[in-house]
Image (cartoon, rainbow, N blue to C red):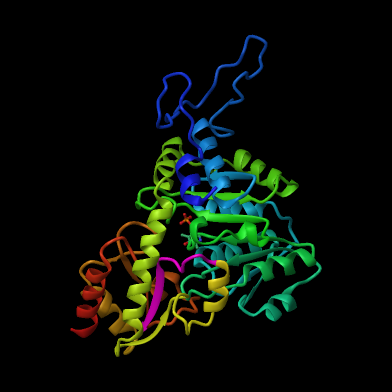
Amino acid sequence: MKIETLAVHSGRAIDPSTGAVTPPLHMSTTYQRAADGSYPKEYIYARSGNPTRSLLEGCLADLEGGTAAAAFSSGMAAIMTVFQTLAPGDHVIAPQDIYHGTARLLRQVLARWRLSTTFVDMTDLDALRRAVTPSTKLVFIETPSNPLLKITDVAAAAELARLHGASSICDNTWASPVLQRPLDLGVDLVVHSTTKYLSGHGDVTGGVLVAAHESDLFSSIRQVQQDGGAVPSPFDCWLLLRSIRTLPHRMRAHSENAAKVARFLDGHPKVAQVFYPGLPDHRGHDVAAKQMSMFGGMLSFRVRGGSDTAFGVAARTELFTRATSLGSYESLIEHRASIEGPETRTPHDLLRVSVGLEHPDDLIADLAQALDR
Ligand SMILES: *Cc1c(COP(=O)(O)O)cnc(C)c1O
């Protein structure tokens, strides 16, 4: 089935007790036991399971082409869970250009639990191969990357992990399952910050892990989810299900708009460099074209004149809100280095843009006046 159809029909069942077409929102924290002490309807207590969450998990597993999914209260809670399935002494390989929260978690929290990490340029498969040690248990992929839109060859990185007996995971937040399906390319797990495109309306914080196969790895993910307890609220699950119905159409519009904005910026004299995998001269364009159906709604660009000029351009835009995050219907612009902190590798003249669902002509006119003034 095509993704538009899955997005509409997955995680949807006519409610048997009322005939309601939209799934009900189940807020109950506890469920009645039978006289013999058993749980006839499978649900026991809200942390371990909730019917609205089950619908969401089924839907997300279908969208990614996986067999099982576990939903969390944030993207970072989902990412933390994967690392918590590992043991002290294990080794992780992660990209240098990775979501800064994931890098900070590995460097500042998990290092204390003796999980070691090597950060490599994952666009260079030889660098990835050289980083493997006998203790390597997980290869963490993020593509397109944040904020430089670097493209990792997902199939090649997953194959390399498998050859060395390590699991692989891909942070698919920026592409969404509409544009890229890492499980089809051979990775074991997909993670999303559902806060972004899957929510799409800037009003839910959430995360999900989707597994290619039911496995020991997924069983321990389920255990950390239920016993660790970083579960999403039923209402957040309900909002996500509601948002996912339009995801394929939103992703197409985000991608078409971003491609137009990228082409405009690419030709502008005040712009030094544009990072968008849809541009033919982007370093990762060929790999992106192979593994993505469209190039997404995120782009970054470097402004001639340094940090102050970059701040000035962001300040003069009128349709772009100066804010972090991405994937919502409205366009956002952000000076990225200043949110990433002192360890950042991001150039100080770089602005990151989440291209929204406004008309692209209006977005381009706004960027033009902000750059030219
Ligand atoms: C936002 C983001 C995260 C973290 O997700 P939260 O929902 O903020 O916890 C992880 N990875 C990527 C690529 C992100 O953009």
Say which of 209 and 248 sits in front: 248
Q: Residue at x 46, y 78 (%)?
A: 346
Part of the protein shown in magenta: 292-302
Q: Residue at x 57, y 58 (%)?
A: 181
Farthest residue toward the right?
Answer: 134
Say which of 39 and 298 sits in front: 298
Decide if residue 248 is in sight here.
yes
Estimate the x, y position of residue 236 in percent, counting from the top left: 42, 41
Estimate the x, y position of residue 271 in percent, counting from the top left: 33, 86
Q: Quadrant of residue 368?
A: bottom left
Q: Quadrant of residue 129?
A: bottom right
Above or below 255: residue 262 = below
Position of 138 with respect to 336 (left or right) is: right
Above or below 138: residue 352 = below
Q: Is residue 300 located in the magenta-colored stretch of the structure?
A: yes
Q: Quadrant of residue 127?
A: bottom right
Estimate the x, y position of residue 319 in percent, counting from the top left: 23, 66
Estimate the x, y position of residue 219 in percent, counting from the top left: 70, 43
Q: Residue at x 63, y 64 (%)?
A: 140
